[in-house]
Image (cartoon, rainbow, N blue to C red):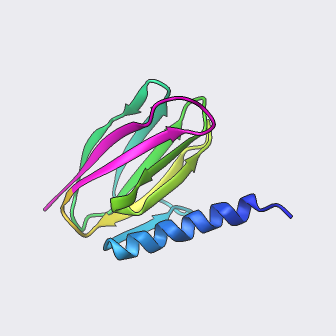
Amino acid sequence: MDFSLLKEGAIVVAALAASVLAGIRLAILTEKPRGKIIRIAVDQSGVRPNQFTLVRDEPAVLEIAAAATSFVFFSPGLGIHLTLQPGMPARVQLRPETAGQFVFSCAARDSGLPVLNGTISVID
């Protein structure tokens, strides 16, 4: 039995549960995105942009693309945890309900690369 799908499903469920607890509306997009689109590029040299601003209660989409290596993108404060595959951008629809500073991190899977960090500012 292939347990990788179960593991990925468990990660998605955990991210959604964390987002509910954090007061964040979050969805992995399977339809047309709504709101401001933030395109994030991840590679061995860093995350671009590594700082950006969202507005509380306004929908936004994070479109995250890994260049050549698989990465894990996560933001505990926003309840996001994604596995990124090279050439396959991931989209997350969110509507932050709480203003503040939220750290996100990217870590390359199966490599010795350092963890890459950034900040999402949510303003009123």
> Residue 118 appears at what percent x and percent y?
32, 41
Q: Is residue 14 above or below residue 112?
A: below
Q: Which residue occupies the extreme left position in the image?
A: 124
Q: Is residue 5 magenta?
A: no
> Residue 1 appears at what percent x and percent y?
86, 64
**Can you see residue 104?**
yes
Q: Is residue 80 left or right of residue 85?
A: left
Q: Nearer the viewer, residue 30 or 78?
A: 78
Q: Which residue occupies the extreme top position in the image?
A: 45
> Residue 25 appears at what percent x and percent y?
37, 71
Q: Which residue is at a point 55% across and 30% down the rendered structure image?
A: 67
What segment carries the magenta color?
Answer: 101-124
Q: Is residue 103 magenta?
A: yes
Corner quadrant of residue 80: bottom left
Q: Quadrant of the C terminus?
A: bottom left
Q: Is residue 48 left or right of residue 43?
A: left
Q: Nearer the viewer, residue 103 or 114?
A: 114
The secondary structure that most of the magenta stretch takes on is strand
Q: Is residue 59 left or right of residue 56?
A: right
Q: Which residue is at a point 61% across and 68% down the rendered structure image?
A: 10
**Can you see residue 33?**
no
Q: Which residue is at a point 60% across and 39% down the rendered structure image?
A: 109
Q: Which residue occupies the extreme front position in the image?
A: 112
Q: Which residue is at a point 44% across and 24% down the rendered structure image?
A: 45
> Residue 65 appears at what percent x and percent y?
51, 39
Q: Which residue occupies the extreme right position in the image?
A: 1
Q: Is residue 5 above or below residue 106?
A: below
Please tell me how many numbered marks the rendered image carries. Answer: 0
Q: Is residue 117 left or right of residue 72?
A: left
Corner quadrant of residue 40: top left
